[in-house]
Image: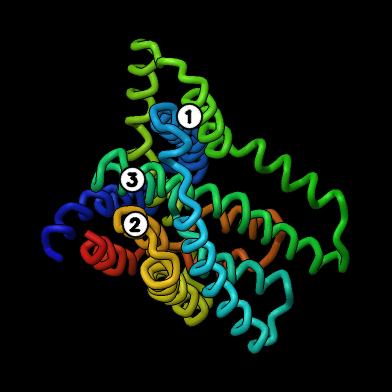
Amino acid sequence: MLPILLKTLPFFALIGLGYWAGRTRFFTEEATAYLTKFVFYFALSAMIFRFAANLELAEVWDARLVAAYLWGTAFVYGIATMVGFLRGLDVQTNAVEAQCAVIGNAGFLGLPMLALLFGPQAIGPVMLVLATDLIVFSSLIVILITVGRDGRMSPAIIKTIGIGLIKNPMIVAMALGLLWSGLQIPIPDPMNDFLSILGGAATPGALFAIGASLASKTTERIQIAGWLSFCKLVLHPAFVAFSAIYLFNVEPFGAAMIIACAAMPVAGNIYMLAQHYGVAPQRVSAAILVSTALSVVTLTAVIAWVS
Protein backbone atom coordinates (compact mmCIF):
# COMPACT_ATOMS: atom_id res chain seq x y z
CA MET A 1 0.00 0.00 0.00
CA LEU A 2 2.93 2.36 0.66
CA PRO A 3 3.91 2.68 -3.04
CA ILE A 4 0.30 3.60 -3.90
CA LEU A 5 0.16 6.07 -1.01
CA LEU A 6 3.27 7.78 -2.38
CA LYS A 7 1.52 8.04 -5.77
CA THR A 8 -1.77 9.37 -4.40
CA LEU A 9 -0.15 11.69 -1.84
CA PRO A 10 0.58 14.50 -4.36
CA PHE A 11 -3.14 14.58 -5.27
CA PHE A 12 -4.18 14.97 -1.63
CA ALA A 13 -1.33 17.45 -1.08
CA LEU A 14 -2.87 19.65 -3.80
CA ILE A 15 -6.24 19.39 -2.06
CA GLY A 16 -4.50 20.31 1.21
CA LEU A 17 -2.83 23.31 -0.42
CA GLY A 18 -6.21 24.49 -1.70
CA TYR A 19 -7.71 24.00 1.77
CA TRP A 20 -4.92 26.10 3.30
CA ALA A 21 -5.46 28.84 0.72
CA GLY A 22 -9.19 28.90 1.42
CA ARG A 23 -8.83 28.66 5.19
CA THR A 24 -6.37 31.56 5.38
CA ARG A 25 -8.55 33.59 2.99
CA PHE A 26 -5.62 33.82 0.56
CA PHE A 27 -8.23 32.38 -1.79
CA THR A 28 -11.65 33.90 -1.08
CA GLU A 29 -14.93 32.03 -1.66
CA GLU A 30 -15.49 34.19 -4.74
CA ALA A 31 -12.06 33.26 -6.13
CA THR A 32 -12.78 29.58 -5.45
CA ALA A 33 -16.11 29.86 -7.28
CA TYR A 34 -14.39 31.34 -10.35
CA LEU A 35 -11.63 28.71 -10.30
CA THR A 36 -14.25 25.96 -10.05
CA LYS A 37 -16.12 27.50 -12.98
CA PHE A 38 -12.92 27.61 -15.07
CA VAL A 39 -12.14 23.96 -14.34
CA PHE A 40 -15.75 22.81 -14.86
CA TYR A 41 -16.49 24.65 -18.09
CA PHE A 42 -13.06 24.79 -19.73
CA ALA A 43 -10.18 22.65 -18.42
CA LEU A 44 -12.10 19.47 -17.51
CA SER A 45 -14.30 19.76 -20.60
CA ALA A 46 -11.20 20.06 -22.81
CA MET A 47 -9.69 16.97 -21.18
CA ILE A 48 -12.89 14.94 -21.63
CA PHE A 49 -13.40 16.06 -25.24
CA ARG A 50 -9.81 15.29 -26.21
CA PHE A 51 -9.91 11.80 -24.73
CA ALA A 52 -13.40 11.05 -26.10
CA ALA A 53 -12.46 12.26 -29.58
CA ASN A 54 -9.60 9.77 -29.62
CA LEU A 55 -11.81 6.86 -28.55
CA GLU A 56 -14.36 4.86 -30.48
CA LEU A 57 -17.82 4.37 -28.95
CA ALA A 58 -17.27 0.60 -29.16
CA GLU A 59 -14.18 1.03 -26.96
CA VAL A 60 -16.06 3.12 -24.40
CA TRP A 61 -19.44 1.39 -24.14
CA ASP A 62 -19.56 -1.68 -21.88
CA ALA A 63 -23.07 -2.82 -20.92
CA ARG A 64 -21.78 -5.16 -18.21
CA LEU A 65 -19.75 -2.38 -16.62
CA VAL A 66 -22.71 0.03 -16.59
CA ALA A 67 -25.03 -2.68 -15.20
CA ALA A 68 -22.54 -3.59 -12.47
CA TYR A 69 -22.05 0.02 -11.42
CA LEU A 70 -25.79 0.70 -11.50
CA TRP A 71 -26.63 -2.41 -9.45
CA GLY A 72 -24.00 -1.72 -6.79
CA THR A 73 -24.91 1.96 -6.59
CA ALA A 74 -28.67 1.33 -6.47
CA PHE A 75 -28.21 -1.23 -3.67
CA VAL A 76 -26.33 1.25 -1.43
CA TYR A 77 -28.80 3.98 -2.42
CA GLY A 78 -31.56 1.68 -1.18
CA ILE A 79 -29.75 1.01 2.12
CA ALA A 80 -29.26 4.74 2.78
CA THR A 81 -32.90 5.43 1.85
CA MET A 82 -34.22 2.69 4.15
CA VAL A 83 -32.10 3.92 7.08
CA GLY A 84 -33.28 7.48 6.39
CA PHE A 85 -36.95 6.50 6.51
CA LEU A 86 -36.35 4.53 9.73
CA ARG A 87 -34.93 7.76 11.18
CA GLY A 88 -38.12 9.58 10.18
CA LEU A 89 -36.67 11.75 7.39
CA ASP A 90 -38.93 13.34 4.81
CA VAL A 91 -38.59 12.45 1.11
CA GLN A 92 -36.48 15.50 0.20
CA THR A 93 -33.92 15.10 2.99
CA ASN A 94 -33.75 11.37 2.41
CA ALA A 95 -33.05 11.94 -1.30
CA VAL A 96 -30.15 14.26 -0.45
CA GLU A 97 -28.66 11.81 2.06
CA ALA A 98 -28.99 8.88 -0.37
CA GLN A 99 -27.24 10.98 -3.02
CA CYS A 100 -24.34 11.61 -0.61
CA ALA A 101 -24.11 7.86 0.02
CA VAL A 102 -23.43 6.97 -3.62
CA ILE A 103 -22.29 9.94 -5.73
CA GLY A 104 -18.55 10.49 -5.56
CA ASN A 105 -16.24 13.14 -6.94
CA ALA A 106 -15.56 11.22 -10.15
CA GLY A 107 -15.26 14.40 -12.23
CA PHE A 108 -12.93 16.67 -10.27
CA LEU A 109 -10.96 13.95 -8.44
CA GLY A 110 -11.56 10.58 -10.10
CA LEU A 111 -10.98 11.52 -13.74
CA PRO A 112 -7.65 13.38 -13.28
CA MET A 113 -6.33 10.97 -10.64
CA LEU A 114 -7.16 7.70 -12.39
CA ALA A 115 -6.04 9.01 -15.80
CA LEU A 116 -2.62 9.87 -14.35
CA LEU A 117 -2.30 6.70 -12.26
CA PHE A 118 -3.59 4.18 -14.82
CA GLY A 119 -3.18 5.94 -18.17
CA PRO A 120 -5.63 7.08 -20.87
CA GLN A 121 -7.36 3.67 -20.91
CA ALA A 122 -8.97 4.65 -17.58
CA ILE A 123 -10.94 7.44 -19.27
CA GLY A 124 -13.57 5.19 -20.91
CA PRO A 125 -14.80 3.48 -17.70
CA VAL A 126 -14.66 6.73 -15.72
CA MET A 127 -16.72 8.52 -18.39
CA LEU A 128 -19.36 5.78 -18.16
CA VAL A 129 -19.50 6.25 -14.37
CA LEU A 130 -19.78 10.02 -14.82
CA ALA A 131 -22.56 9.65 -17.40
CA THR A 132 -24.48 7.22 -15.14
CA ASP A 133 -24.17 9.54 -12.14
CA LEU A 134 -25.21 12.63 -14.09
CA ILE A 135 -28.02 11.11 -16.18
CA VAL A 136 -29.55 8.64 -13.72
CA PHE A 137 -28.89 9.80 -10.17
CA SER A 138 -28.73 13.58 -10.71
CA SER A 139 -32.11 13.28 -12.42
CA LEU A 140 -33.45 11.07 -9.61
CA ILE A 141 -32.64 13.56 -6.84
CA VAL A 142 -34.38 16.39 -8.71
CA ILE A 143 -37.47 14.20 -9.23
CA LEU A 144 -37.60 13.09 -5.57
CA ILE A 145 -37.11 16.59 -4.13
CA THR A 146 -39.71 18.11 -6.46
CA VAL A 147 -42.28 15.33 -5.98
CA GLY A 148 -41.66 15.33 -2.22
CA ARG A 149 -42.27 19.08 -2.12
CA ASP A 150 -45.17 19.39 -4.59
CA GLY A 151 -46.73 15.96 -4.03
CA ARG A 152 -46.93 15.19 -7.74
CA MET A 153 -44.91 14.60 -10.92
CA SER A 154 -45.21 17.26 -13.61
CA PRO A 155 -43.86 17.76 -17.15
CA ALA A 156 -41.89 20.74 -15.84
CA ILE A 157 -39.63 18.34 -13.88
CA ILE A 158 -38.67 16.50 -17.09
CA LYS A 159 -37.97 19.83 -18.77
CA THR A 160 -35.77 20.93 -15.84
CA ILE A 161 -33.81 17.66 -15.96
CA GLY A 162 -33.38 17.85 -19.74
CA ILE A 163 -32.13 21.45 -19.65
CA GLY A 164 -29.77 20.57 -16.79
CA LEU A 165 -28.21 17.73 -18.78
CA ILE A 166 -27.88 19.81 -21.95
CA LYS A 167 -26.18 22.60 -19.99
CA ASN A 168 -23.74 20.26 -18.21
CA PRO A 169 -20.34 20.80 -19.90
CA MET A 170 -19.11 17.29 -18.99
CA ILE A 171 -22.04 15.66 -20.80
CA VAL A 172 -21.66 18.04 -23.76
CA ALA A 173 -17.88 17.48 -24.00
CA MET A 174 -18.35 13.71 -23.79
CA ALA A 175 -21.09 13.66 -26.47
CA LEU A 176 -19.21 15.99 -28.84
CA GLY A 177 -15.97 14.05 -28.41
CA LEU A 178 -17.63 10.71 -29.20
CA LEU A 179 -19.45 12.30 -32.16
CA TRP A 180 -16.13 13.66 -33.45
CA SER A 181 -14.63 10.20 -33.07
CA GLY A 182 -17.64 8.55 -34.74
CA LEU A 183 -17.32 10.83 -37.75
CA GLN A 184 -13.63 9.85 -37.87
CA ILE A 185 -12.46 13.45 -38.15
CA PRO A 186 -8.74 13.75 -37.37
CA ILE A 187 -7.91 16.38 -34.75
CA PRO A 188 -5.58 19.01 -36.30
CA ASP A 189 -2.27 19.40 -34.46
CA PRO A 190 -2.90 23.01 -33.32
CA MET A 191 -6.33 22.00 -31.94
CA ASN A 192 -4.86 18.94 -30.23
CA ASP A 193 -2.11 21.06 -28.64
CA PHE A 194 -4.69 23.63 -27.50
CA LEU A 195 -6.87 20.93 -25.90
CA SER A 196 -3.81 19.29 -24.34
CA ILE A 197 -2.61 22.56 -22.74
CA LEU A 198 -6.09 23.55 -21.53
CA GLY A 199 -6.90 20.02 -20.35
CA GLY A 200 -3.58 19.91 -18.52
CA ALA A 201 -4.92 22.57 -16.15
CA ALA A 202 -7.78 20.25 -15.10
CA THR A 203 -5.84 18.11 -12.63
CA PRO A 204 -4.12 20.81 -10.49
CA GLY A 205 -7.04 23.21 -10.90
CA ALA A 206 -9.69 20.68 -9.89
CA LEU A 207 -7.76 19.40 -6.87
CA PHE A 208 -6.93 22.91 -5.66
CA ALA A 209 -10.58 23.93 -6.12
CA ILE A 210 -11.75 20.91 -4.08
CA GLY A 211 -9.48 21.92 -1.20
CA ALA A 212 -10.40 25.61 -1.34
CA SER A 213 -14.12 24.77 -1.36
CA LEU A 214 -13.68 22.46 1.65
CA ALA A 215 -12.43 25.43 3.68
CA SER A 216 -15.96 26.86 3.72
CA LYS A 217 -17.58 23.56 4.74
CA THR A 218 -18.80 22.92 8.29
CA THR A 219 -18.82 19.73 10.38
CA GLU A 220 -22.30 20.00 11.89
CA ARG A 221 -24.22 16.73 12.35
CA ILE A 222 -20.96 14.79 12.55
CA GLN A 223 -22.69 11.46 13.29
CA ILE A 224 -24.77 11.70 10.11
CA ALA A 225 -21.67 12.77 8.17
CA GLY A 226 -19.86 9.70 9.56
CA TRP A 227 -22.67 7.38 8.47
CA LEU A 228 -22.86 8.87 4.96
CA SER A 229 -19.05 8.74 4.64
CA PHE A 230 -19.14 5.06 5.65
CA CYS A 231 -21.74 4.41 2.94
CA LYS A 232 -19.73 6.29 0.33
CA LEU A 233 -16.19 5.13 1.16
CA VAL A 234 -16.85 1.55 2.32
CA LEU A 235 -20.27 0.21 1.32
CA HIS A 236 -20.36 1.74 -2.16
CA PRO A 237 -17.02 0.35 -3.43
CA ALA A 238 -17.73 -2.98 -1.67
CA PHE A 239 -21.09 -3.52 -3.38
CA VAL A 240 -19.83 -2.27 -6.76
CA ALA A 241 -16.90 -4.71 -6.43
CA PHE A 242 -19.26 -7.59 -5.58
CA SER A 243 -21.50 -6.67 -8.50
CA ALA A 244 -18.65 -6.27 -11.00
CA ILE A 245 -16.76 -9.42 -10.00
CA TYR A 246 -19.46 -11.92 -9.06
CA LEU A 247 -22.69 -10.82 -10.76
CA PHE A 248 -21.70 -9.29 -14.10
CA ASN A 249 -18.18 -10.64 -14.63
CA VAL A 250 -16.78 -7.28 -15.79
CA GLU A 251 -13.33 -7.47 -17.36
CA PRO A 252 -10.65 -6.79 -14.68
CA PHE A 253 -9.44 -3.33 -15.72
CA GLY A 254 -12.94 -1.91 -16.15
CA ALA A 255 -13.98 -3.44 -12.83
CA ALA A 256 -10.95 -1.86 -11.13
CA MET A 257 -11.85 1.58 -12.50
CA ILE A 258 -15.52 1.54 -11.43
CA ILE A 259 -14.55 0.24 -7.97
CA ALA A 260 -12.01 3.09 -7.64
CA CYS A 261 -14.67 5.58 -8.79
CA ALA A 262 -17.08 4.19 -6.20
CA ALA A 263 -14.43 4.83 -3.51
CA MET A 264 -14.28 8.57 -4.27
CA PRO A 265 -15.47 10.97 -1.52
CA VAL A 266 -18.86 12.72 -1.67
CA ALA A 267 -19.21 14.98 -4.72
CA GLY A 268 -19.32 18.74 -4.31
CA ASN A 269 -22.20 19.21 -6.77
CA ILE A 270 -24.57 17.61 -4.22
CA TYR A 271 -23.98 20.61 -1.96
CA MET A 272 -24.92 22.96 -4.80
CA LEU A 273 -28.15 21.01 -5.36
CA ALA A 274 -28.95 20.92 -1.64
CA GLN A 275 -28.30 24.66 -1.35
CA HIS A 276 -30.36 25.41 -4.47
CA TYR A 277 -33.40 23.50 -3.15
CA GLY A 278 -32.82 24.47 0.49
CA VAL A 279 -32.65 20.84 1.66
CA ALA A 280 -30.09 19.92 4.36
CA PRO A 281 -27.04 21.77 2.93
CA GLN A 282 -25.25 21.61 6.31
CA ARG A 283 -25.24 17.83 6.51
CA VAL A 284 -24.07 17.60 2.89
CA SER A 285 -21.29 20.06 3.70
CA ALA A 286 -20.20 17.92 6.65
CA ALA A 287 -20.36 14.71 4.61
CA ILE A 288 -18.13 16.22 1.90
CA LEU A 289 -15.57 17.43 4.44
CA VAL A 290 -15.47 14.19 6.49
CA SER A 291 -15.46 11.83 3.50
CA THR A 292 -12.69 13.78 1.73
CA ALA A 293 -10.50 13.71 4.85
CA LEU A 294 -11.06 9.97 5.39
CA SER A 295 -10.52 9.17 1.70
CA VAL A 296 -6.79 9.84 2.09
CA VAL A 297 -6.70 6.38 3.73
CA THR A 298 -9.73 4.59 2.25
CA LEU A 299 -9.27 5.64 -1.39
CA THR A 300 -5.57 4.83 -1.25
CA ALA A 301 -6.40 1.38 0.15
CA VAL A 302 -8.97 0.71 -2.59
CA ILE A 303 -6.61 1.86 -5.37
CA ALA A 304 -3.85 -0.34 -3.90
CA TRP A 305 -6.27 -3.30 -3.89
CA VAL A 306 -7.52 -2.83 -7.48
CA SER A 307 -3.97 -2.25 -8.67
Residue in view at x 34 percent, y 48 percent: 18
Pick the quarter of the image with the N terminus.
bottom left
The amino acid pointed to by label 1 is: Phe
What residue would you read off at disc 1?
42
Tell me the element at label 3.
helix
Q: Which of the two labelled residues, at mark 2 and mark 1, occupies the earlier sequence position? A: 1
- In the image, residue 216 sits, relative to residue 229, either above or below, namely above
Q: Looking at the image, which residue sits at the far left?
A: 3
* Distance Cα–Cα, label 1 vs label 3: 21 Å
* Distance Cα–Cα, label 2 vs label 1: 32 Å
Q: Which of the two labelled residues, at mark 2 and mark 3, occupies the earlier sequence position? A: 3
Residue 208, visible in the rendered structure:
no
Residue mark closest to the camera, 2 vs 3: 2
From the viewer's perspective, is 159 left or right of 13? Answer: right
* Distance Cα–Cα, label 2 vs label 3: 13 Å
Quarter of the image holding residue 301?
A: bottom left
The amino acid pointed to by label 2 is: Glu
Residue 46 x/y as whole percent: 44, 28
The amino acid pointed to by label 3 is: Ala
Residue 45 x/y as whole percent: 47, 32
Q: Residues within 10 Å of mark 2 (few under 14, many from 20)?
A: few
- Residue 251 is labelled as 2
- In the image, residue 81 sits, relative to residue 62, either above or below, namely below
Residue 247 x/y as whole percent: 44, 71
- Residue 122 is labelled as 3
Pick the quarter of the image with the C terminus.
bottom left
